[in-house]
Amino acid sequence: MSVFNDYFVRPFFEGTGYNHVNTLVYSVIFILFVLFLFKSLKKLGLKIDKNFLKALIPFVLLASVVRSLTDQGVYDYTFFTVSPGIYLTITVIASACLLVSMLVEKRFGVKYHEFLVVLGSFLFASQLVQLDMKHWDAFIQILLLFGLMAVPTVLMVKRFGIGFLNGFYPMLALLGQFIDASATAIAVAFHGFWEQHVLTRWVFELTGSAFSMIPVKIIAGILIVFAVDRWEDNPDFRNFLYFAMIVLGWGPGLRDSLSALALP
């Protein structure tokens, strides 16, 4: 019980961030959660294609803005409004919307993914309007750094025909690592943010720079996308793994960007 309190309970309530123990445990839980979700979706007879994944993107945005609103004090700081609990919260909301969308398709003939993206976009917009957007300089700095990384990467992939990155979802998964690295670097270096992830803190302490995570994210992102493309033959599961990368990259990256935008 003492171990659970020291590594899970106290860090949450004291706001001291992740440690090596809870990081490892949460990582294992996330992997198992991804496998469970994939098998559940397949039991529903859903194909994990581009339409399905596009319909889920608004829910990734929803998670980011809800987390930013929690930083801003609109929502209470609870397990279900910050990571890792917010992933469960948004999954429940997205699952409910998915089931409603499937019922709408069955009853009215509207494609479920078209109705799902409308529901997700409405929920996202309803939360975004609550965000106090006033610190545009921080937000623009993040976008500029992201653009300096993203534009040359996209152009090189197109120019040299780098196959494993030459697709909407593998590229979106990689760019998610770019926005996460950009938002973290700018927010920590210039706007008083504190990095809560243990590995990233270690890299910062080792190098003395918040920008040191950028090459790490680039290399890790490319290697992971390459591994998924090379070794996963099931197209549905491959797409779902790309989506998991999108969640882990764009989710925290947009949260940091929006939180910087809403700085006091």
Image (cartoon, grey):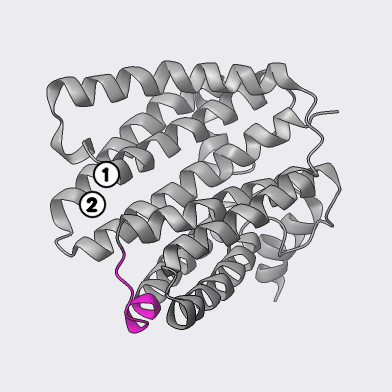
The residue positioned 42% from the left and 75% from the top of the image is 109
Of residues 215 and 153, the one drawn nearer to the viewer in this rendering: 153
Residue 52 against residue 200 in the figure, above or below = below
Q: Position of residue 7 (x, y in %)?
A: 66, 61
- Image quadrant holding the N terminus, namely bottom right
The residue positioned 70% from the left and 16% from the top of the image is 137
* 59 horizontally vs 51: left or right: right
Q: Secondary structure at mark 2?
A: helix
The residue positioned 55% from the left and 77% from the top of the image is 100
Which disc, if any, is residue 194?
A: none
Q: Secondary structure at mark 1?
A: helix
Is mark 2 in CB contact (under 8 Å) with mark 1?
A: yes
Of residues 256 and 206, the one drawn nearer to the viewer in this rendering: 256
Residue 112 against residue 196 in the figure, above or below = below
The residue identified by callout 2 is 228
* 169 horizontally vs 128: left or right: left
Of residues 66 and 45, the one drawn nearer to the viewer in this rendering: 45
- In this orientation, does residue 63 appear? no
* 24 horizontally vs 149: left or right: right
The residue identified by callout 1 is 225
Which corner quadrant of the image does residue 243 belong to? bottom left
Amino acid carrying mark 2 in the image: Val
Mark 2 neighbour class, 10 Å CA radius: few under 14, some 14 to 19, many 20 or more: some
The residue positioned 61% from the left and 59% from the top of the image is 84
State which region is magenta: 39-48
- 42 falls in the magenta region: yes
Mark 1 neighbour class, 10 Å CA radius: few under 14, some 14 to 19, many 20 or more: many
Residue 197 against residue 12 in the figure, above or below = above
Q: Position of residue 110 (x, y in %)?
A: 44, 70
- In this orientation, does residue 66 appear? yes
